[in-house]
Image (cartoon, coloured by chain):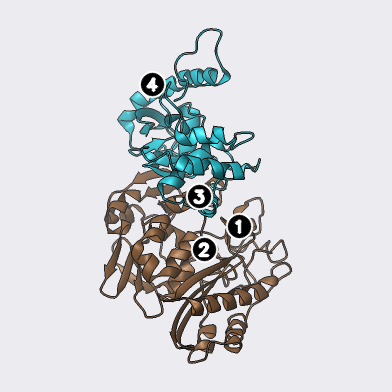
Amino acid sequence: MPNASSPAAGNASRRNFLIATASTAALPAVARAASAKAVLAQDPRNVSAPIGLALRVNGGERLVALDIRTTLLDALREHLGLTGSKKGCDHGQCGACTVLVDGRRVLSCLTLAASAEGRDITTIEGLAKPDGPLHPMQQAFIDHDAFQCGYCTPGQIMSAIGCVREGHASSDAAIREYMSGNLCRCAAYPNIVAAINQAKGLMKET
Amino acid sequence: MRPFAFDHVSTLAGAVQAAGHAQSAFLAGGTTLIDLMKLDVMQPDVVIDINRLGDSALGKIERTADGVRLGALVRMADAAAHPDIRRDLPVIAQSLDLAASAQLRNMASLGGNVLQRTRCTYFRDVSYAACNKRSRGSGCAALDGVNRMHAVLGVSDQCIATYPGDFAQALIALDATVCIVGAGQKARAIPFAALHRQPGETPDVETTLRPGELIAFFNVPAEPWARRSLFLKIRDRKSYEFALASAAIALDLEGDKVREARIALGGVATVPWRAKAAEEALRRKTLDDQAIGAAADAAFANARGREHNAFKIALGKRTLARALRQAAALQI
């Protein structure tokens, strides 16, 4: 998580404030999960009761107690405080919620959190280590001004990483085709293509 | 979304056992099911997650004595990238490449893909009371509504919803079969063409699957026309869009004479549509403009357009004609 260290007093950026708040908010969920873990299987007489799940997010295991209907996106945002993944359409049409599951880009809004248990989930928060350099794709988006409002950007970056890893970034045309599931209402598309072209050569080791 | 019981199964037997319930649904990629559950169009009270079966043969593509067997849990992207599929069955690879987005193709299973539900707006929006597909006997708001995206082939006066997929057209053109398993019964195989049902009087019954049955495999026979095959998709935007009209073509040529033709149409029909009359119009003919025109006319002879979608008849014919010319020009 970038900038996850405690902000110095008087130097609390909005981002740090949000992360700090979210981390605190996540604590009760973890505490609840400790008891819910014992009833991991759903009670068939009360399917609305929360179930306990262990989600492996950004390299760490997180315990949560969730309504079975909770999508991976809502689990990340509302229960784990990882609000980088965005909710755009919530129907798999816009790509703003894109995360990597076992290294593949998928839509977290159409994935049940329960289906993601036991799998490696990577969100935008997991790309760079605290105080470490940005992921080449993050840096490339900054270098090429590949966004305006920024709302679609986490999904664009996660999808772009998937696109490069799949070998689908060989040309501008391939990038446009294989990034077509990520919509940008600001239409930063030319700059997104330029950013992916920059990052693809630097991503070998990631 | 309504509450549901959730079951994570690890074996095929366990999956079909757990589904012995009228309102159960199998969950693979979830790209149709979760979407429609959010919209309250689908309301299963038991959801059976079958993704763990992906480690079994259901998650694999294997050569068989007479062709290729595709596991129903193979993801669309993986099937499209498989070297054997790209080389020997290009129409399948292309139908998958041109479908959906990269993320959706990474998620969606082949079995789920052929069962995806229509994109008819009146079906997807439950605030419209009239939808015979959602609720038998409630009427059809599309007949006299905004029906630009709707079907012109296989329609009834109860439903004109378009079958939305692409891959199914490739399967039906190649005479694929479907292997189906269910609790307490032997696995059964049916022609892919027998999987989907035209709407007729019961648009709510979309397939011949019995309650609780699961698609396990698709078998695609190796035939001489499979390599000279392609999928052409015409849509409102260049990528990530459903077809206005599409054609899956496989040709076996002897010089410029057609030994055998396989033709399926998408975007224009209520089900994956095999255009047998068009195939017959081409057999033993020289593949010239006259034969191509006759085939296109034959394919749409029984088409019925409505207020906004009548253009699909001309578009569908041109799509078919262009696909035939492109297939004939392929260097095999």
Q: How far apart are marks 4 and 3 (CA)?
A: 32 Å
Tell me the tag on residue B43: 3
Name the residue: 50% across, 40% down. A198
Q: Nearer the viewer, residue A71 or B138?
A: A71
Callout 2: SS: loop
Q: Which of marks 2 and 3 is nearer the N terminus?
A: 3
Do tags 4 and 2 sit on the same chain?
no
Q: In the displayed orientation, state which residue is furthest to the top.
A: A9
Q: How far apart are marks 1 and 4 (CA)?
A: 42 Å
Q: Nearer the viewer, residue B86 or A42?
A: B86
Q: In which quarter of the image is residue A62?
A: top left
Q: In the displayed orientation, state which residue is furthest to the left.
A: B65
Q: Is residue B25 left or right of residue B299?
A: left
Q: In this view, does B65 lie to the left or right of A149?
A: left
The local crowd at label 1, few if under 14, some if 14 to 19, many if 20 or more residues have their Cα within 10 Å, is many
Tell me the tag on residue A197: none
Query: Can you identify the residue that label 1 sits on?
Result: B123
Q: How far apart are marks 4 and 2 (CA)?
A: 45 Å
Q: Nearer the viewer, mark 3 or mark 1?
A: 1
Image coordinates for residue B119, horizontal then vertical, percent: 59, 58
Tell me the tag on residue B165: 2
Chain ID, mark 2: B
Colour of chain B in the rendered structure image: brown
Do tags 1 and 4 sit on the same chain?
no
Image coordinates for residue B95, horizontal then vertical, percent: 48, 65
Query: Can you identify the residue that label 4 sits on?
Result: A31
